[in-house]
Image: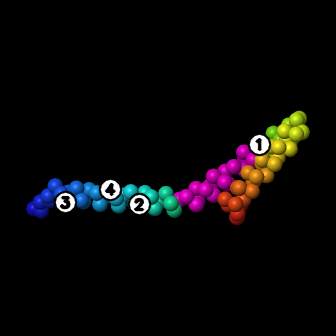
Amino acid sequence: MITIKPREEKILLTMRITRTALVYILTLLSLGCSLNRMVVRSTQGILENSLRALYEEEDIPLAEIAAASDLKLLEGLIKADPEN
């Protein structure tokens, strides 16, 4: 039977924790891009409702300000997922 000293046991535990953390970090980093695309593509319904609300706005100056804001939002979404 192999006996493991307490110091070696701590080293092995640290290595396992480090390896597990590295796997989680790499997984999250690899999902980052696809997660970003998924979020951008899921905003279609929100944008449709925003456009509908803009058409229903009776305060024209407020609608103009909101439209400018929406255009900047759309630019950001295009930069986040140019293929969409």
Q: Position of residue 31 (x, y in %)?
A: 53, 59
- Residue labelled with disc 3: 8
- The residue carrying pointer 4 sits among few (fewer than 14), some (14 to 19) or many (20 or more) residues within 10 Å by Cα, namely few
Highlighted range, magenta: 31-48
* Circle 4/circle 3 CB separation < 8 Å: no
- 9 horizontally vs 71: left or right: left
Distance CA(mark 4)–CA(mark 2):
10 Å
Q: Is residue 27 visible?
A: yes
- Residue labelled with disc 2: 23
- The residue carrying pointer 1 sits among few (fewer than 14), some (14 to 19) or many (20 or more) residues within 10 Å by Cα, namely few
* Circle 2/circle 3 CB separation < 8 Å: no
- Residue labelled with disc 1: 49
Query: Which residue is at 63% across, 58% downward?
Result: 37
Amino acid at circle 2: Val
Amino acid at circle 3: Glu
Q: Is residue 56 visible?
A: no
Q: Position of residue 65 (x, y in %)?
A: 82, 43
Distance CA(mark 1)–CA(mark 3):
60 Å
Distance CA(mark 4)–CA(mark 3):
14 Å
Is residue 10 in the magenta section?
A: no
Distance CA(mark 2)–CA(mark 3):
22 Å
Earlier-in-chain disc, 4 versus 3: 3
Residue 39 vertical position relative to residue 65 in the rendered view, above or below:
below
- The residue carrying pointer 3 sits among few (fewer than 14), some (14 to 19) or many (20 or more) residues within 10 Å by Cα, namely few
Amino acid at circle 4: Ile
Q: Secondary structure at mark 4?
A: helix
